Amino acid sequence: AQTVTQSQPEMSVQEAETVTLSCTYDTSESDYYLFWYKQPPSRQMILVIRQEAYKQQNATENRFSVNFQKAAKSFSLKISDSQLGDAAMYFCAYRSLYGANSKLTFGKGITLSVRP
Amino acid sequence: DGGITQSPKYLFRKEGQNVTLSCEQNLNHDAMYWYRQDPGQGLRLIYYSQIVNDFQKGDIAEGYSVSREKKESFPLTVTSAQKNPTAFYLCASSIGQGSNQPQHFGDGTRLSIL
């Protein structure tokens, strides 16, 4: 079974600075998807960014980018030019490419606070 | 606009009572999921369904039941056998297996014990 580990329960960043959120995972599969979801105080889950394991290029979405290290099974999220609206819980998630279902395996999440 | 609608937003359960959480989607997605979220635990999968009239247990299915009679609907019943039902429940849907399309989530239902 796959596992996803987010070892930092909380992080803080100064507005306009850059912060990196860590995520590691364990799998025996060679092809899979990785996601970062954001959950603001409203509790809605919002997709931030996704990465296909077969792509070597790191995904980027505006101020959000990932550092995907397949051999190390690491998938960190970098937020540049942090804004107050970035304050939320962030979840890393894994999904198999194949198999009988498309279920997500989530990490426990990290709470990010942004200091004005 | 397409999306997932969960209702009610807040729900209270009395001792020994079954309650049902509603989840409806108009995204034409085949797969639907129910997650439970507890503080410090992340999201844990309760049940999922890949197609109408079929569903599978997730990691924490005990004390819960589901049905999938229509593609658009995937209600979750929290039975009296679930001794610790207080949590935030999230419903999600996706196109299906083998796709890089993400799961879309509803706004959740918070269930509390009276």
Image (spheres, coloured by chain):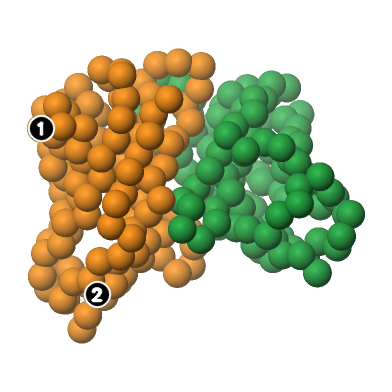
Chain colours: A orange, B green
Q: Residue at x 37, y 61 (%)?
A: A89
Q: What element carries label 2?
A: strand
Is B8 on the left or on the right of B98, as rendered? right
- Nearest the viewer among A97 and B39 is B39
User: Do marks 2 and 1 both belong to one polypeptide chain?
Assistant: yes
Farthest-out residue, right: B16
Residue linked to disc 1: A57
Q: Quadrant of the N terminus of chain A?
A: top left
Between A92 and A59, the one lying in front of the other is A92
Residue A86 higher or lower than B6, as above or below: below
Residue B112: give x, y in percent of width and height. 72, 65
Task: Give, as a three-letter code, the residue at label 2.
Answer: Val
The quadrant where residue B71 appears: top right
Residue A48 position, x and y percent, is 30, 50
Q: Earlier in the sequence, mark 2 or mark 1?
A: 1
Amino acid under disc 1: Gln
Rendering quarter of residue A72: top left
Q: Disc 2 and disc 1: Cα gap in Å?
A: 28 Å
Q: Can residue A86 be seen in this view?
A: no
Tell me whether circle 2 and circle 1 mark residues in contact (CB < 8 Å). no
Q: Percent position (x, y) of residue B26?
A: 59, 41
Residue named by callout 2: A114
Residue sitting nearer the eye, A79 or B96: A79
Categorize mark 1 by other alpha carbons within 10 Å: few (<14), some (14-19), many (20+): few
Answer yes or no: is residue B65 visible.
yes
The residue positioned 28% from the left and 57% from the top of the image is: A8
